[in-house]
Amino acid sequence: MENSRAGENGSGSERGEWGNQSPAYRAHRGRTEHGQGPGGPAGAETTPIEHVEALLGRAQNGFEIDERMLGRLRTALMHQAELRSYRQRNDDRRPLRCNSYRHVFLLADGSSLLLFELEHNTGPEDVFVYELYADEDVLDRAERRVHDRIGGGIGPGSETEELPAWLAEELLLAMGPVQPRREYVSDGSPDHARRLLRRAENEDGPGEVVRELLQGALGHHIALITKPRRRGPGRDATWCRFYEHAFLLEGGGELSLWELEHNMNTDGRLVCEVYLDEAEAEVAADRHARSQGVEL
């Protein structure tokens, strides 16, 4: 019996409540026998540099990550881990597993870097081995090598392709909307609001009344909002992220701006759009996806 899943996808005061695993990642990692999340036990919070050190420490090929990339990773402000693919084959001796994870790092200059982790137990002993790659094509080749060891059919149309009931259920439940815990930062909140609205490229964003109101903001909090994305297996270069920028106003009121960050345009450029309502941001994302023939 074999189970397979691929393509789970998935950018501090400047960007998102990162530093924890994505819900899909936690739902999957919480069921693995070794029970480790990125950098420690599942659910443990780590800084970006601690996360990088944990990845390098457990990877048998960590030395392949060059110093230039490591230097950039040391400037990371936030990180997030996502389940990328999952495969399990139950043979006569023991279950054989091959999982891959996408580790996303937001850097101080506003760009992002990806590391890809391969986890499998196809060796002679029932222990998990970890491999780390900076290039997704190299990861794909390593993953095929492990799949060859596991044997059996895999991929779309395979008669044995299905998710175990517990994983299918937990992925759907865990990927639902999550209300972030707000911890307001009081440093430069009006400036943060100005920068956010200045880089927004949509014409139907918040107006002057909102801009003036935010000039008196006493604090702000940014959270990455996880949205369910149901796609088939295969390479997907789409970037689509939602962020809530919550502002604490004079008098104790709150106001949220919803940022849509995506590359669903003709040139693949990363753009920012800002909306007053979460539903408006979701509608805009769907509109951009349809125009590019992308399935969210």
Image (tube, rainbow, N blue to C red):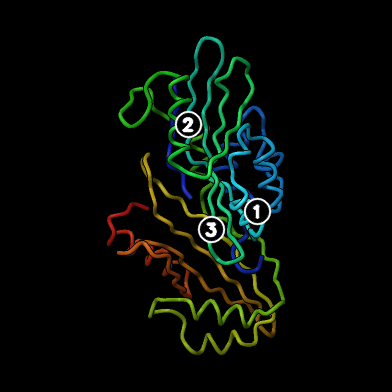
Which residue in the protein does label 3 denote?
112
Provide residue 290's location: percent of width, then percent of height.
29, 59
Q: Amino acid at mark 1?
A: Gly
Q: Is residue 31 above or below residue 198?
A: above
- Which tag, 1 or 3, sits closer to the chain's start? 1
**Residue at the image position 36 percent from the left and 41 percent from the top:** 232
- Which tag, 2 or 3, sits closer to the chain's start? 3
Q: For this rendering, which residue is in front, 56 or 187?
A: 56
Give the distance between the C-alpha atoms of the residues marked 1 and 3, in whole angstroms. Answer: 14 Å
Q: Is residue 19 above or below residue 165?
A: below
**Residue at the image position 65 percent from the left and 82 percent from the top:** 217
Provide residue 215's location: percent of width, then percent of height.
61, 87
Instruction: Choose top left, top right, bottom left or bottom right for residue 240.
Output: bottom left
> Given this view, does label 2 or label 1 mark the residue nearer the observer?
2
- Where, quadrant-wise, is the N terminus in this rendering? top left
Which residue in the protein does label 2 denote?
142
Say which element carries label 2: helix
Give the distance between the C-alpha atoms of the residues marked 2 and 1, in whole angstroms. Answer: 27 Å
Give the distance between the C-alpha atoms of the residues marked 2 and 3, in whole angstroms. Answer: 23 Å
Q: Amino acid at mark 3?
A: Ser
**Residue at the image position 45 percent from the left and 25 percent from the top:** 147
Q: Is residue 280 above or below residue 294?
A: below
**Residue at the image position 63 percent from the left and 16 percent from the top:** 125
Which residue in the protein does label 1 denote?
19
Question: Can see residue 106?
Answer: yes
The crowding category of the residue bearing disc 1, from other C-alpha atoms within 10 Å (few below 14, some 14 to 19, many at least 20), is: many
| Residue sitting at the far front | 67
Q: For this rendering, which residue is in front, 154 or 3?
A: 154
The crowding category of the residue bearing disc 2, from other C-alpha atoms within 10 Å (few below 14, some 14 to 19, many at least 20), is: some
